[in-house]
Amino acid sequence: MNNKIQELIDNGILTLGKGVIIEEMVLVANREETNEGELRQISIGDHTIVRAGAIIYEGVTIGSDCRIGHGCILRTNASLGNNVVLSHHVIVEHDSKLGNWVRVSPHTHITSCMTVEDRAFLGAGVITVNDKFLTWKRNDREPNLLPPYVEFGARVGSGTTLLSGVRIGKMAMVGSGSVVTKDVPPYTIAFGNPAKVQRELDEEHRTPNGYEEVLTEME
């Protein structure tokens, strides 16, 4: 464990659970330019592994038994539940929340203030957008940020774009390469550009990913 991480622990900024592994070249407690005052606390749960090259900003919470891949960036106040897997070069923007048993494949971008509920799966290279008009630093208006929302057990295929404000329903499945401009209802399959609902999800695919007592979580 490097001296910077030990210093953060000694100063009460960083809390590590049992058996946490933080590899070399991990940056912890980075700060946004606009943040001031004392550093916000960071928590990493039991048996989580953070791979080399990851960057963890202040205020981040990571649950137990997580895997944070090489080159991942977790921005301020991002929150991860237990048993989350972020493959390499995943970006989780500020104030986003990922539930338990969420898996995110490489090179996916989770926009700010987004929620991904328990047991959802985002494929590789998924793009999420939280602003319909791409407003930035204007005197006449403030941006109206509205991120996508991914419900329990939903699966989003690789190369998909989720536009601002869309909601992917419980256990829904979005095909690879889709552009989602409207909500996808629960237990349906949608794909295309723009994505359209094609049919209901087969019964055999209605069991969510992850272990434990999955039925009690769905009740």
Image: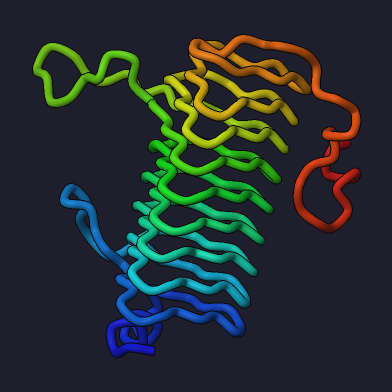
Q: Residue at x 68, y 28 (%)?
A: 173
Residue 56's x, y, as percent? 36, 63
4, 134: nearer the viewer? 134
In screen coordinates, is 128 left or right of 144? right
Image location of residue 144, percent across then percent down: 32, 18
Q: Nearer the viewer, residue 104 or 32?
A: 104
Q: Nearer the viewer, residue 205 or 91?
A: 205
Res 174 → quadrant: top right
Which residue is rendered at x = 37% and y = 45% of the image? Answer: 94
Q: Is residue 74 depicted above or below 155 in this figure? A: below
The image's colour scheme reads rainbow
> In which quadrant of the rendered image does the N terminus lie?
bottom left
Please determine whether, in this image, residue 26 is positioned above or below residue 151: below
Foreground pick, 108 / 18: 108
Determine whether, in the image, residue 4 is placed left or right of residue 141. Answer: right
- Total labels: the figure holds 0
Give the x, y percent position of residue 187.
78, 22
- Locate residue 217: give its quadrant: top right
Residue at coordinates 65% horizontally, 35% vertically from top-left? 155
Q: Is residue 64 left or right of residue 107?
A: right
Residue under the point 16% across and 51% down? 33
Query: Residue 120, relative to residue 202: is it above or below?
Result: below
Quadrant in the picture for the C terminus: top right
